[in-house]
Image (cartoon, helix red, strand yellow):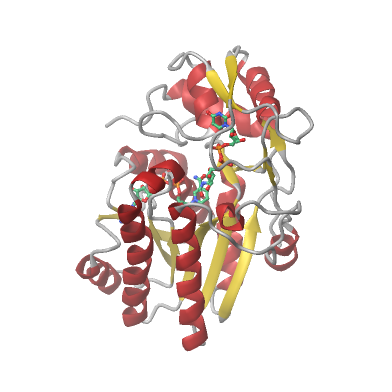
Amino acid sequence: MNILLTGGTGYIGSLTCVGLIEAGEHPVILDNLGNSKPAVLERIAAVTGVRPAFVEGDVRDRACLDELLARHRIDAAIHFAGLKAVGESVRLPLPYYDNNVHGAQVLASALHAAGVRTIVFSSSATVYGDAKTMPISEQAPTQATNPYGRTKLMVEQMLEDLAAAEPDWSVTLLRYFNPVGGHPSGLLGEDPQGIPNNLMPYIAQVAVGRRERLTIFGDDYPTPDGTGVRDYIHVLDLADGHVAALRHRCGRAGVRVFNLGTGRGHSVLEVLRAFEAASGRRVPYVVAPRRAGDVASCWADPARAERELGWRAQRSIEQMCRDTWSWQLANPTGYPS
Ligand code: NAD
Ligand code: WQD
């Protein structure tokens, strides 16, 4: 199949691209390089032996999409492209609605016009807000607590409305928990610009000497050691989840929502210790007050994905740390410009 990957040079898109090539599919990447570098394409080629087709462009640019869709016989799209920083979305909501909501609307319209009826959307566990019960199943109530989360919910709803109006659409909503790790070769990984917002890249930058110490946001949560608990999932497991979702969902009409998580939670201190063991480096830290908007715990019930997609996360927290470290050590300042 020819698969359009919007945001395909980004963190999750690039590793999913590798997974798709290894599964014998033909990805076509569309990315505006707003948060990724062209060097990613060489790295994908180094890992797989295949340089994926690439179009530099924006999902909000209808003419660009129409041209891409006319040139490549696209069977399905995976829509990764978007902005993803929660704090930034609070300060700058409009670019989030523009990139994420308007972007998805332009993409869906262009796919529709081109006769493509299969879309897989990168959603997020953030749509569960402060869930009352763990693990979180897909039936849990949704509730966004910030503009970023609201854009994810809006796009989910828009695609649901589309599938309700036009029953030949196949819409798959994948709610990722906390993706971490990189390719074991050290060639592909997460390359945040500026100060990392997320735990794993922050720890990795402390371990490699780019930052002095980790700040732990709160050690007074109602969790076993007082620090926040999350469902960290290896990005390669996530990539496998996309391949499984495409294989299973292509041609099956209607909307299906899947959690992509491991079903296991790890605390901040557990991740820190696992990273120290994997890297052989000490990771100094200080404890600070809780970060606004954080929940105490969040982990998935991934049973539906296993039952329906035959997919289950395989990789341990040790491997997540090992592969993050291989990437960080080989690319201490990220991808070359
Ligand atoms: P990323 O920033 O590494 O990748 C997103 C890519 O999209 C980047 O390469 C960027 O240049 C591109 N892009 C952004 N806006 C675009 C536009 N308007 N047109 C074309 N390209 C555009 O992010 P990621 O971590 O790979 O996340 C991928 C998707 O998964 C996002 O939609 C994100 O919201 C979602 N998600 C991420 C996480 C996470 O923790 N990383 C968790 C849940 C969901
Ligand atoms: C994990 C834990 C922090 C950094 C975010 C988004 C979510 C999704 C994934 C996109 C928490 C603690 C963190 C640090 C810390 N993204 N922490 N010091 O908040 O679960 O989810 O990324 O959809 O929408 O909200 O992930 O990695 O930021 O935090 O103590 O410097 O680590 O408090 O307990 P989070 P995270």
User: Toward the viewer: 120 or 268?
Assistant: 268
Residue 118 x, y percent position in the rendering: 47, 74
Residue 174 x, y percent position in the rendering: 57, 61
| Image quarter of residue 286 | top right
User: Toward the viewer: 81 or 92?
Assistant: 92
| Image quarter of residue 57 | bottom left
Is residue 154 among what the camera can see? yes
Q: Is residue 62 above or below residue 262?
A: below
Residue 144 x, y percent position in the rendering: 53, 57
Is residue 166 among what the camera can see? no
Residue drawn at the location 52% of the way across and 73% of the way down: 171
Residue drawn at the location 35% of the way across and 59% of the way down: 97
Looking at the image, the residue that sits furthest to the right is 224
Question: Would residue 31 be found to the left or right of residue 136 on screen?
Answer: left
Question: Would residue 307 be found to the left or right of residue 21 on screen?
Answer: right
Residue 81 x, y percent position in the rendering: 38, 55
Task: Locate the C terminus and report the quarter of the image it occupies.
Answer: top left
Q: Is residue 197 above or below residue 278?
A: below
Residue drawn at the location 71% of the way across and 60% of the way down: 137
Residue drawn at the location 45% of the way across and 67% of the way down: 155
User: Toward the viewer: 65 or 145?
Assistant: 145
Q: Is residue 179 above or below residue 251?
A: above
